[in-house]
Image: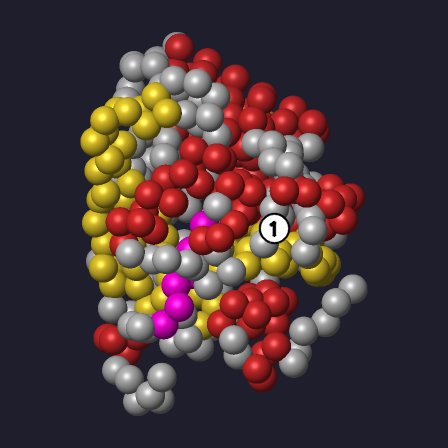
């Protein structure tokens, strides 16, 4: 690609909402009718396409700034960044069941259970619609890594490689325990007419699982302040601030739907005939290192990367430098690929 290509060309994007008329059968039973899949394709024109998927809160806006909408992975994806969009084109989508413009729950109406296989089937329909015969890669983190594994099991011929960050072939029971309580809190809030408060509490609890105990120890050891005769702890203020922010922008029914989808996720690793880079964070409480090592051992063609981060499960959002040599396999950057180290 020419070095002097204008920034506008590097960030040129196309987006839309694909509608699939009729019934869309679901993995766990039931159907969705006239399915909508919202997508965005951005980056260097004529370059290989990489599908990028994040946690359940992620959207099709992977990088850049489009009005008030900021890319959820700007620290990692973009021109000259770890996933270099001067070398690849990035495809993003709004998850089925999420808070974006894809088909999602409607307040007060029943919505069926979704599987990571359903998300993978939506990806396949999107690739066909866009005329993309084969992806260079799927880079999936957290729930996105689960979807990547599901796609690899069902549609291996349509993707060259997978990069799976902090996602295993099934959820760990302890993580399911935490998420089950979160969903119960949100459902209780909906039932008593306080959905926002339920979301705030559930997100506050979730935040305590996303990061590492070492990070909390470093940040929140200060003594509490007194308010109305009661102590307010620094960690408490942080968690509830994050909860309020999340509740203001995420639909409770969507949270329940996709949180449940994480815990329903199961793939057969031995059937995934795609080269897979498995990326594990040693301090991840939600996806323990042992589960990631076991996944890599069962995959037919895998390479395991391990690194440490105080950010725990959220490391994929923060550790651009540690991800850079791994993502070089996707962008085909020989200089960065030489930096790779394996533990």
Q: Residue at x 48, y 35 (%)?
A: 117
Find residue 236 and report its image quarter.
top right
Decide if residue 209 is on the left or right side of residue 4.
right
Q: Position of residue 234 (x, y in %)?
A: 59, 42
Decide if residue 235 is on the left or right side of residue 118.
right
Whether residue 177 is visible here, answered yes or no, is: yes
- Residue located farthest toward the top when viewing the structure as drawn: 192
Range drawn in magenta: 47-53
**SS state under label 1:** loop
Tell me how many marks there are: 1
Q: Residue at x 63, y 27 (%)?
A: 176
Q: Position of residue 119 (x, y in %)?
A: 42, 38
Whether residue 315 is visible here, answered yes or no, is: no
- Residue located farthest toward the front when viewing the structure as drawn: 157
Which residue has dot 1 on it?
273
Q: Residue at x 26, y 49 (%)?
A: 129
Q: Residue at x 62, y 56 (%)?
A: 276
Q: Position of residue 121 (x, y in %)?
A: 40, 38
Circle 1: is it few (<14), some (14-19), or many (20+) Cα within 10 Å?
some
Q: From what the image shows, is residue 300 above or below residue 238?
A: below
Magenta span: predominant SS is: strand
Picture quarter with the C terminus: bottom right
Q: Position of residue 137 (x, y in %)?
A: 49, 60
Q: From what the image shows, is residue 52 above or below residue 29?
A: below
Picture quarter with the N terminus: bottom left
């Amino acid at each position: 690609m020419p070095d002097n290509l204008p920034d506008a060309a590097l960030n040129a994007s196309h987006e839309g909402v694909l509608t699939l008329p009729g019934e869309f059968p679901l993995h766990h039973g039931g159907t969705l009718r006239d399915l909508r899949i919202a997508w965005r394709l951005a980056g260097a024109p004529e370059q290989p396409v990489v599908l990028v998927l994040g946690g359940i809160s992620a959207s099709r806006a992977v990088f850049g700034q489009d009005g008030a909408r900021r890319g959820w992975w700007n620290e990692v994806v973009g021109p000259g960044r770890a996933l270099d969009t001067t070398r690849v084109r990035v495809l993003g989508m709004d998850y089925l069941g999420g808070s974006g413009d894809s088909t999602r729950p409607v307040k007060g109406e029943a919505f069926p259970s979704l599987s990571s296989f359903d998300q993978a089937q939506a990806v396949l329909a999107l690739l066909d619609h866009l005329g993309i015969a084969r992806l260079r890669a799927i880079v999936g983190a957290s729930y996105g890594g689960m979807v990547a594994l599901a796609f690899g099991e069902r549609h291996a011929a349509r993707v060259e490689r997978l990069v799976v960050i902090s996602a295993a072939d099934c959820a760990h029971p302890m993580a399911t325990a935490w998420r089950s309580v979160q969903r119960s809190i949100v459902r209780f809030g909906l039932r008593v007419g306080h959905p926002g408060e339920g979301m705030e509490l559930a997100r506050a609890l979730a935040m305590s699982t996303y990061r590492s105990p070492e990070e909390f120890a470093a940040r929140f050891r200060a003594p509490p302040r007194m308010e109305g005769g009661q102590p307010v702890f620094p960690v408490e203020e942080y968690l509830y601030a994050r909860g309020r922010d999340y509740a203001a922008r995420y639909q409770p029914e969507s949270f329940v739907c996709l949180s449940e989808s994480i815990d329903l996720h199961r793939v057969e690793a031995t059937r995934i005939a795609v080269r897979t880079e498995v990326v594990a964070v040693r301090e991840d409480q939600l996806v323990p290192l042992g589960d990631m090592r076991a996944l890599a051992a069962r995959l037919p063609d895998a390479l395991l990367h391990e690194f440490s981060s105080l950010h725990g499960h959220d490391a994929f959002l923060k550790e651009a430098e540690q991800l850079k040599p791994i993502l070089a396999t996707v962008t085909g950057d020989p200089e960065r690929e030489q930096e790779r180290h394996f533990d």
